[in-house]
Structures are given as structure tokens and as C-alpha cells.
Image: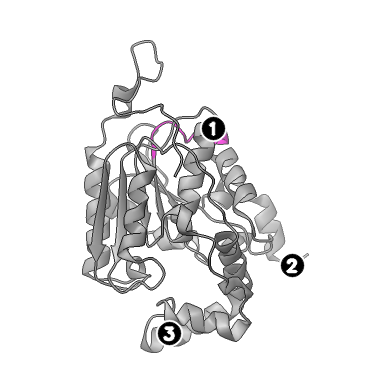
Amino acid sequence: MSPAEPLVAALPRDALWFPRFGAPPPAAGAAGTVLICFPYAGGTASVYRDWREPLGTEVMALQLPGRGLRMREEPYTSAEPLVADVADELVRRGLTRDYAFFGHSMGALLAYETGCALRERGEPGPRHLFVSGSRAPHLYGDRTEHLLPDAGLHRFAAGIGALGDGDRALVNGAYLARRLPVLRADLRVCNDYRWRPRRPLDCPMTAFSASDDPVAGAAEVEAWRAYTTSSFLRHHVPGDHFFLTTDGPSRERLLRELRGELARLPRAAALTTTDGAAAPRSEQREASWTY
């Protein structure tokens, strides 16, 4: 057994799925809506480690197997079991009362599917769904990057902006070389995914597209509009596929818009009746829907 294994075994399950960054969370009910963030392909929870302060709310980031303290675990290669396990964990932890989802690229797809899975279990849906750098779900399933050899996969990652520029590209390139199996597994999750018709979610949705994103063009991000019966707003920002990881105006705008939308959400107490039952959402539609 390696020195790292006893540490991982001793960690509570919560810390594996949702590692804590910085100060402990405030007392229950003090932080308002919890924003649960889903990583992009090959990404880790640490991408969101500094979001809590600028957003002014509790932020929890999902750590998937194959990275961080879960490095010794096999990564998922299919969306269905991954989504089922994430939904299990959210229900187990009691996180399905007052929450919103944010997902970038693959993370947007997982956030949407998790919202659908929770609804199918009779759990409350997200208060708001934020999707970024992602085509709408029905547009997935037509790519094969997970089949590329290592050199080709490295070139693909560089081509969509994953490595950055200059010295940063050298450092990130060396890191990527070690993480190619995880990236390949995540891309297989995306590329093997096939959307199945279901009625839209009933929460507001905000989408972010980037001007130079070769993975998710503006029209492909706009196609998320059909996935909610509530309001839909899309922001178009300068940058490439990884604009959210680069300090600058586009990342600042992303965080500013997230903070504003989260602050406008009604208090969770307003969504229940006097007997504690969930109140119906005024915009909810029960009609069946197919795309």
C-alpha cells in the first residue's frame, strides 16, 4: 500500500465527491442557494476553489474519480452510471432542497442529466441551471476525439485552448501528458452520450458561449433554450473554450452574472407552503415534450 492510500481510505466520503476548499461552510441556511459545479472533461474540482467569495454563496465542486485524491479510482466512461452516482450522493447529503447547478462543457451535460435524474426520483430540481461552453444535449454524440492516439489527443487539447500560452502551456502540457487517460475517459462519456427525449426542466437557465470556442458555437449553445420551460438567457463573451479559467474580462463577467442571478433567486422558504410542502412553480408545465 502506498503512503497516499491510508489517507484516502481515512477521508470521509463527502470529501471525496465534494472536497472542501478554504474556510468551513457557514451554518445551515446562512449561505442561501448552494451552487454545485460540475467539471469539464479532464477537469478537477479545484477549478472552482476560489468562486465562493466572488459569488457570495456556498460553492461545492464535484470531484470525479481518476483525479485529485481519487486518482487511484477508475474514471467513468459512460454518462448513465456517473449521473446515477452523482444523484445518489446529492440525495444522501441532503443537497436537493436549495441548490443551483453550474457546468462547463462536459459539466453542463452532466448537470442537465443530473437534474433530470433527480426529477425522476421525485426530488426538487435545481433552482437555476447555468451551462457554459457546451452544445445542447441533442447535439452530442458526433465526435470521436477519445479514439485519438496520445499525440493527437494532446494536439486536440492544445487546439481548444486547454494549455494556454507561453510558459503556462509548457507546464500544462506536462500535466496533461500524465492525465490523458482521464481526459480520454471523459471524452468518451461525451462522445458516446445519446440524448433521450424528456420534457424540459422548469428552472431558469443561463448559458455562456465564447467567441472563439471551436467546441460549442453560439448557435449550438443557444439550442439549450429548448431545455427549459422557464426563462432563458445567453451571454456571449470573448475568448476560447476555456475562458472561465483565464483571468480577464470574460471570467469576471461570468462570475458577475452568476452572482447576480443567484442573488435574484427567491429565498427557499418562499418555495414551500405553510405545512412544509413544496409549492408549485408558477411557470411549470406538465405537457409531454419531445425534441
Give how far across and how far down residue 5 sits, in percent. 71, 61
Overall secondary structure of the magenta stretch? loop
Residue denoted by label 2: 2
Q: Quadrant of residue 161?
A: bottom left
Q: Which residues are magenta?
A: 91-99
Residue type at numbered disc 1: Glu
Q: Which residue is mark 3?
A: 169
Question: Residue, x 32% and y 61% (percent of image)?
Answer: 219
Residue type at tag 2: Ser
Magenta-drawn stretch contains 96: yes
**Residue topped by disc 1:** 120
Q: Nearer the viewer, mark 3 or mark 2?
A: 3
Instruction: Look at the numbered discs 3 and 1 and tell me whether their residues touch, using CB distance below 8 Å.
Output: no
Label 1 vs 2, first from the N-terminus: 2
Give the vertical position of 91 relative to 146 (above or below).
above
Task: Assign the C terminus to one quadrant of the image.
Answer: top left
Name the residue at 50% across, 62% down: 44
Quadrant in the picture for residue 129: top left
